[in-house]
Amino acid sequence: KKIKKFVLNRFPSLTQKSASDYNNFDREFLSEKPKLSYSDKNLIESMDQSAFDGFSFINPKFEQILNK
């Protein structure tokens, strides 16, 4: 219960000033080097993708560029 209480108390005070605000991340996390995720194309193609039929996503930041 102590852990749960600690986590809950750390959440309700978090604020985000902008989309690029990283102040809520701890220094250990921020100091880690980024790692690209590896995806096995054969594994993905072997899985049922029908749940994604008709789905598309365009990052809103790039949508304006595409519409020009």
Image: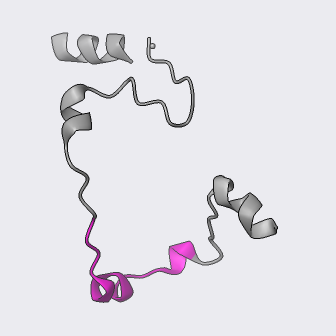
Q: Position of residue 44 (x, y in %)?
A: 35, 81
Q: Is residue 67 above or below residue 19?
A: below
**What residue appears at the point 28 percent right and 18 percent down from the top-left corner?**
7
Q: Is residue 8 magenta?
A: no
The residue lying toward the viewer, choosing from 30 and 37, is 30
**What residue appears at the point 76 percent right and 59 percent down from the top-left corner?**
64
Quadrant of res 3 = top left
**What residue appears at the point 25 percent right and 71 percent down from the top-left corner?**
38
Quadrant of res 67 = bottom right
Q: Position of residue 28 (x, y in %)?
A: 18, 31
Number of labels in the image equals 0
Say if residue 53 shows up in the picture.
yes
Residue at the right extreme? Answer: 68
The residue lying toward the viewer, choosing from 65 and 52, is 65
Q: Position of residue 57 (x, y in %)?
A: 62, 65
Answer with left or right where residue 61 lies relative to residue 33. Answer: right
**What residue appears at the point 23 percent right and 58 percent down from the top-left corner?**
35
The residue lying toward the viewer, choosing from 40 and 1, is 40
* The N terminus - image quarter: top left
State the colouring used for the structure image: one colour
Q: Is residue 42 above or below residue 30?
A: below
Answer with left or right where residue 15 lies relative to residue 30. Answer: right
Q: Is residue 40 magenta?
A: yes
Answer with left or right where residue 61 lies relative to residue 68. Answer: left
Q: Which residues are magenta?
A: 37-52
Say if residue 1 shows up in the picture.
no
* The C terminus - image quarter: bottom right
